[in-house]
Image (cartoon, rainbow, N blue to C red):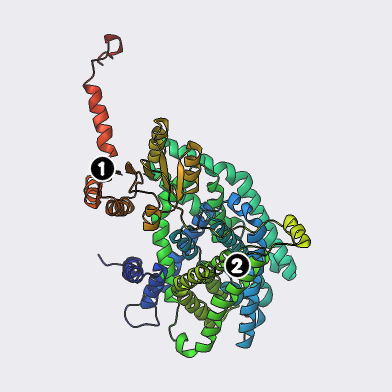
Amino acid sequence: MHHGPLIAILVAGLGLAFVFGALAQRLRISPLVGYLLAGVALGPFTPGFVADQNLANELAEVGVILLMFGVGLHFSLKDLLSVKAIAVPGAIVQIGIATLLGLGLGLALGWSWISGAVFGLALSTASTVVLLRAMQERRMVQTEKGRIAVGWLIVEDIAMVLALVLLPVLAEALNGTPAGAGPGPLATRFDLGIWGVLGLTVAKLFAFLAFMLIVGRRVIPWVLHWVAHTGSRELFRLAVLAVALGVAFISASLFGVSFALGAFFAGMILNESPLSQRAAEETLPLRDAFAVLFFVSVGMLFDPGILLRAPFSLLGTLAIILIGKSLGAWLIVRAFGRSNATALTISASLAQIGEFSFILAGLGVSLAILPPEGRDLILAGAILSILLNPVTFALVDRFAAEAPAKPKPKPGIAETIAVVEKEPEPEPTPDIAPTTLSDHMVVVGYGRVGALLGAGLIARGEKLLVIEERGDAVAAAKRDGAELLLGNAADPAVLAAAGLDRARRLFVAIPQSFEAGQVCEQARRDNPELPIIARAHSDAEVAHLTKCGATLTIMGEAEIARAMLSLCAQAEPPPAQVQPAA
């Protein structure tokens, strides 16, 4: 049996992405860079095997749908509203600044104004993956800086989703390019003009929103709840994928909006359901796999020759991403009265471009409103900015640490009145404060197992410290009255603040065995005598955690079997409870 191009691109794409991604991880840079370079190696601009570009684009479309579905699953209206006063206007102004800078560079390169505007718009949005990973590594997701950055990113994502809907319509009105996502023949038949086309598109967009809020909001959660009650994990996973792909297809077929927008709203509607966390967990492996193929397909479009053909244009593009966007964000955050440390953090987190930039670049070229050179500059700028983002954060951390806060002079009457009328500027987020507890219990992870364990320990009067970073679990630990340490327990700085040298026991209640092994190893180094109790799901995980330093590892399946066997040792049930033989 001969293999086809689908198997070839899956094997070559995922295989090379793994090799380059692992190398990037080893060099302590984002694996995204590795995935993009894998695509460059498979593309037509480098020697060797060349993958089927059309098939890669089809797989990339699925990756876009699942990526946007994931963005919708993590879209929290509550988090956005908490920082709306700065995130909404800040993101809009920053998008405007970057778009104007890109427009200026495009005009200097001899492009049309629409090409320059699309180019600048693509440079204005940051990568969700890179930003969230940087925030998680620095334990900032739950801080004010993290909430502002994530809220800012959500506003950018919404703006880009709208741009994906309106760009085809604008291109059709300007140069007659067929727009698969726009009203198309209907607008042409009635000669509506650009404003009529835009108005019709916005009307169809609102019709889709109404459909999702009225019908989808009831049907999607009901379907998933029904499937969840069947007890079939396979059916639940299949239902989530069917919802994501089905809503995306319906949105494009019936309402003329993009696949991306449909998938985004499917995820956002599902976010309101209690099953959203489970849906995200069940679909994560497939989303990650297709997301990798998406980045590989983007890398296949990149022509490395742009580095030699247009070095000054590339430098101008990088200047917009690393300096123009960052400086604009810093000025905006400072204008809203936030601290310099917060402004620097937001600036560093936005000093890169990613997923939506690739989508906009590809759409612009397909609609003939962006020259291929613009796409190459965007892709090169993305690769280099993602590569330099950790360096940017390191410089920001060093600069913020070396800039001590200046003592404020005693205010006069006018200044006092101004301070009273103005919301006080929040203090910079401090470093992790070590616990003062001693002879206490430490629980890592406050999910279903950790919450039951913690509630039992508190009921017994134990002093409890919980290490957690997920918002819902943090709220549960607060309700139970535990002391909290926000962050990832696998981070040595977080674990060092838990006072393990004074603790009585450490319970590692997280289900991820590799991360749990890191916690056990570090805890054992900090306190060789500390009893460490961990959880596992297989004999291999038990052996792994024991090797990492766990004193006792409890396998859930084994404990269930022991509980059932213990019932056999009890007295036989009374005769009235014995069922007669059939």
Outermost residue on the top side: it is 576
Q: Residues within 10 Å of mark 1 (few under 14, many from 20)?
A: many
The image shows residue 473 at horizontal and vertical percentages of 46, 44
Residue 225, compared with residue 90, is above or below; it is above
Left or right of residue 49, residue 163 in this image:
right
Q: CA distance from mark 1 to mark 2?
A: 51 Å
Residue at 74%, 66% in the rendered image: 196
Q: Amino acid at mark 2?
A: Lys
Q: Position of residue 150 (x, y in %)?
A: 55, 59
Q: Amino acid at mark 1?
A: Thr
Judge left or right: residue 203 versus residue 271.
Answer: right
Q: Is residue 266 visible?
A: yes
Residue 169 in view (yes/no): no
Residue marked by disc 2: 406
Residue 206 location (% of width, % of height): 67, 55
- Give residue 553's mark: 1
Give whichever of 228, 511 is nearer the camera.
Answer: 511
Q: Residue furthest front?
A: 410
Q: What residue is at 32 percent from the left and 71 percent from the top? A: 23
Q: Which quadrant of the rendered structure holds the N terminus?
A: bottom left
In the image, taking residue 515 as reference, residue 294 lies left or right, namely right
